[in-house]
Amino acid sequence: MGARIQLTTELRRKDFLGCNYRPSHPVIRPPWAISESDFQELCTGCNACIDRCPTSILKKARGGYPIVVFDNDQCTFCGGCAEVCKPRALRREEGNPPWTLVASVNASCLSSAGVTCRICGDYCDARAIAFKLAVGGKATPVIERSLCTGCGACIAPCPVRAIRIQ
Ligand code: SF4
Ligand code: SF4
Ligand code: SF4
């Protein structure tokens, strides 16, 4: 019984130790992260990647591990985070893509209500967002998965936060 209470306490301590950000949806590890189980094995929660990120999109989350939060900026794929990751939990190697994540638009997009908005398209350097014209003058954003890099540049500017990276 005593051991069980101690284990629970330890888990709680680990969960909340240094945790500044608690996401409400599946977490995104920094680019070039190795498999989740190996990542948790190797990452020491040292903060080096977080401190290095020029766009400040890396945050310390549950367990002390870093995650990507696109609330204010995007990933430029500069590689800085992987460069400073000593335990190699982030591993940038030849032919190894940063991730396979892409953006998707949900039903709260203003175009669903007939409002004209093309902000996300303006921010997409990869030109992965096209606007499909529909009856009634609506123009719905459609993400071309083969072009989307998952950089997240379209997320923060969206006035209703209708875009997620998945
Ligand atoms: S690649 Fe650069 S911009 Fe992207 S998370 Fe790493 S340090 Fe930040
Ligand atoms: S910025 Fe947001 S609301 Fe505007 S078109 Fe894009 S997804 Fe829709
Ligand atoms: S995540 Fe980046 S590449 Fe993909 S649609 Fe958004 S801005 Fe374009």
Image (cartoon, rainbow, N blue to C red):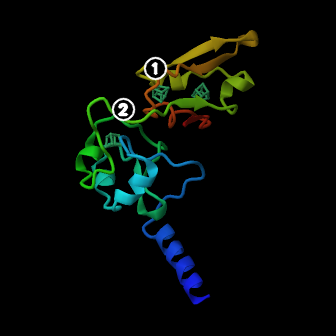
Figure check: 103 above or below 26: above
Q: Percent from the top left, x then y, of residue 135?
A: 75, 10
Q: Disc 1 residue type?
A: Leu
Mark 1 and ligand 3: say if the CB distance to the nearest ligand atom is below 8 Å. Answer: yes
Residue mark closest to the camera, 2 vs 1? 2
- The quarter of the image holding the C terminus is top right
Identify the mark at residue 5; answer none if there is no mark: none
Name the side, left or right, on which 84 lies relative to 22: left
Residue placed furthest toward the right: 136
Name the side, left or right, on which 53 lies relative to 28: left
Lower sequence index among marks 2 and 1? 2
Binning the other alpha carbons within 10 Å of mark 1 as few (below 14), some (14 to 19) or many (20 upward) gives few
Whether pointer 2 and pointer 1 mark residues with C-beta atoms closer than 8 Å, the reply is no
Disc 2 element:
loop
The residue identified by callout 1 is 147
Q: Percent from the top left, x then y, of residue 78?
A: 28, 36
Q: Percent from the top left, x then y, of residue 163?
A: 58, 34
- The quarter of the image holding the N terminus is bottom right
Q: Disc 2 residue type?
A: Pro
Q: Residue at x 59, y 15 (%)?
A: 131
Q: Percent from the top left, x then y, of residue 96?
A: 33, 33
Identify the mark at residue 97; answer none if there is no mark: 2
Disc 1 element:
loop
Figure check: 31 above or below 139: below
Give me the C-alpha separation between circle 2 and circle 1.
14 Å
Q: Quadrant of residue 143?
A: top right
Q: Residue at x 37, y 41 (%)?
A: 31
Q: Whereabouts is ligand 2, in terms of quadrant?
A: top right
Q: Residue at x 33, y 53 (%)?
A: 50
